[in-house]
Amino acid sequence: MATVCQIWRPDRGRCLKSYGIIAVLFMDLMLQCVNGSLSTTNVETHYTRDGPLITSPVVPAAASVFPADEDTSKCPSGGLCHRLPADCIQCDYHLKCTYGKPTLFTCRPKKGVHCIGESGQQQTNFSLNITCQFCWQLDPSQYRCTNSTNCMTVSCPRKRYNATCDVLDHVHCLGRRRFLKRLFCNWTGGYKWSTALALSITLGGFGADRFYLGQWREGLGKLFSFGGLGIWTLIDVLLIGVGYVGPADGSLYI
């Protein structure tokens, strides 16, 4: 039997070593790219004894930069600086603050707006005490949202719609002052629950309650069936009484 002998070559180990060095360098380059992408996060949250601490090495451009041609004709001039509306001042908002805690921010009136301090002298820079929270975290009483009349309020489960909300002028907050929110359908077409219930009890056999609510087909059905021989009338009294049957346009009762 012939013996197969493999001759060891000195340069074979050297080639493997070179390939290993190249592979290590490639892995190191990939790790640096991943670490760089992870380190670009704008907002970091740390928790302290007083609550979550919002920190950021970068100030969002939307919070501190305003268009140069923004209209300031509605901004009052000559009043106290800290009483100016939020759209009339420019603040250097930073996110190194504890959520829900008052924080001092350096602000200045916009171009063309003049204000004075407590001493009566005109100021170009002043400090403003603002609660550390974003605009979308405000209480609903501090902003106004658009209302949709194209969604059904009487439905199970309750439906929502996309609303555009604007913060009130005198309220100061971090981030964009216009934001989107998902709200429950909540609008009325002027129908009164008491009127619908009274018509259901008195004239329900003739479909008056259904006609009042805009449900013409059900009203005609009750009219020609004499209220379903009284059974449909009793059922409608219960359904309208508990609010299960509402206006045909999907709005709420007044």
Image: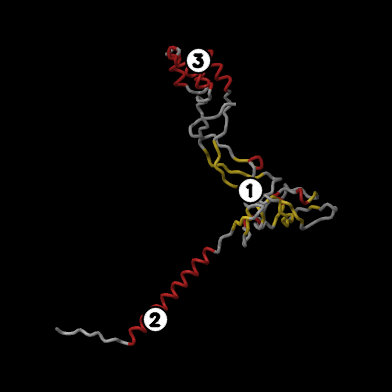
Residue 222 lies, with reference to residue 55, above or below; the image says above
How far from the left and from the top, in percent, is residue 55? Answer: 63, 58
Q: Amino acid at mark 2?
A: Ser
Q: Mark 3 or 2, which is nearer the eye?
A: 2
The answer to the question of whether label 3 and label 2 lie on touching residues, with beta carbons closer than 8 A, is: no
Earlier in the chain: of badge 1 and badge 3, it is 1
Mark 2 lies on residue = 18
In this rendering, position of residue 18 left or right of residue 42: left
How far from the left and from the top, in percent, is residue 126? Answer: 77, 56
Mark 1 lies on residue = 135
Q: Is residue 67 in view from this perspective? A: no
How far from the left and from the top, in percent, is residue 80? Answer: 80, 50
Instruction: Measure the C-alpha gap from mark 1 to mark 3.
Output: 49 Å
Q: Secondary structure at mark 2?
A: helix
Q: Amino acid at mark 1?
A: Cys
Earlier in the chain: of badge 3 and badge 2, it is 2
How far from the left and from the top, in percent, is residue 22? Answer: 41, 77
